[in-house]
Amino acid sequence: ASALEFVQEWRDTCFKRTNDWDQVLFGSVLKKGMGVGGGVDESPRLKKMYRKADGTHVLAGVLPVSLFASGHTFFVSRMAHLMHTTPYMVHTTFQYGGAQGKRHRLRESMVWEDEPGYYTQPDFLTYDLDVPWELVYPNGGDVQ
């Protein structure tokens, strides 16, 4: 099921309503022609949202936050770390410093991959992190 029609309408709406926030427009376009009632017969966890020209719908569902982490759940709450999982993706939500601040946060968490030349710039300190397990996890790694 293609969502291209939805994305094109969202893009067009963003160009028409330049003073509105793109994420608010995303939600309003997604709800256009939204199905009424519960979930889809094949999967009650999916909901019919945007109605396409051919009468079919773009489906939406809730993704598990441990695998599709927001900035807060990954960087602040550290959910993936506490659950001993690796998220599929991290959405760098609002962050001071704009895009540079987001890249810095991802680098700190070692989920941003730079070219080797980035780390050989003048006045750039690099080191190999080797902290004993006992210092990082004084309780043996148990979450309390």
Image (cartoon, grey):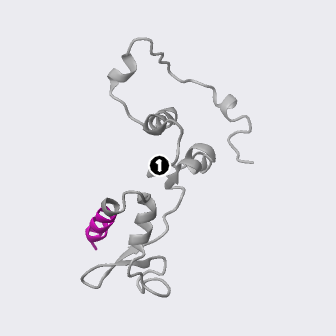
Question: 21 and 68: which one is in front?
Answer: 21
Q: Choose top left, top right, bottom left or bottom right for residue 13.
A: bottom left
Residue sitting at x 47%, y 50%: 91
Question: 26 and 12: which one is in front?
Answer: 12
Q: Is residue 84 visible?
A: no
Q: Amino acid at mark 1?
A: Val
* Quadrant including the N terminus: bottom left
Q: Choose top left, top right, bottom left or bottom right for residue 27.
A: bottom left
Disc 1 crowd, CA 10 A, few/some/many (<14, 14-19, 20+) = many
6 horizontally vs 102: left or right: left
Task: Tally the marks.
Answer: 1
> How far across and how far down the image is residue 125, in percent?
48, 15
Query: Is 62 situated above or below 57?
Result: above
Q: Secondary structure at mark 1?
A: strand
Residue at the farthest left position: 54
> How far across and how far down the image is residue 109, in percent?
51, 36
7 horizontally vs 31: left or right: left
Residue sitting at x 30%, y 82%: 56
Query: Is 77 situated above or below 31?
Result: above
Magenta stretch, overall SS:
helix
Q: Does residue 67 belong to the magenta stretch?
A: no
Question: 130 and 115: which one is in front?
Answer: 115
Residue sitting at x 50%, y 85%: 38
| Residue numbers of the magenta segment | 1-13
Q: Does residue 6 belong to the magenta stretch?
A: yes
Query: Is 81 situated above or below 23?
Result: above
Q: Is residue 13 visible?
A: yes
Q: Badge 1 is on which residue?
A: 90
> How far across and how far down the image is residue 47, in percent?
45, 78
30 horizontally vs 144: left or right: left
> How far across and how far down the image is residue 112, in percent?
42, 36
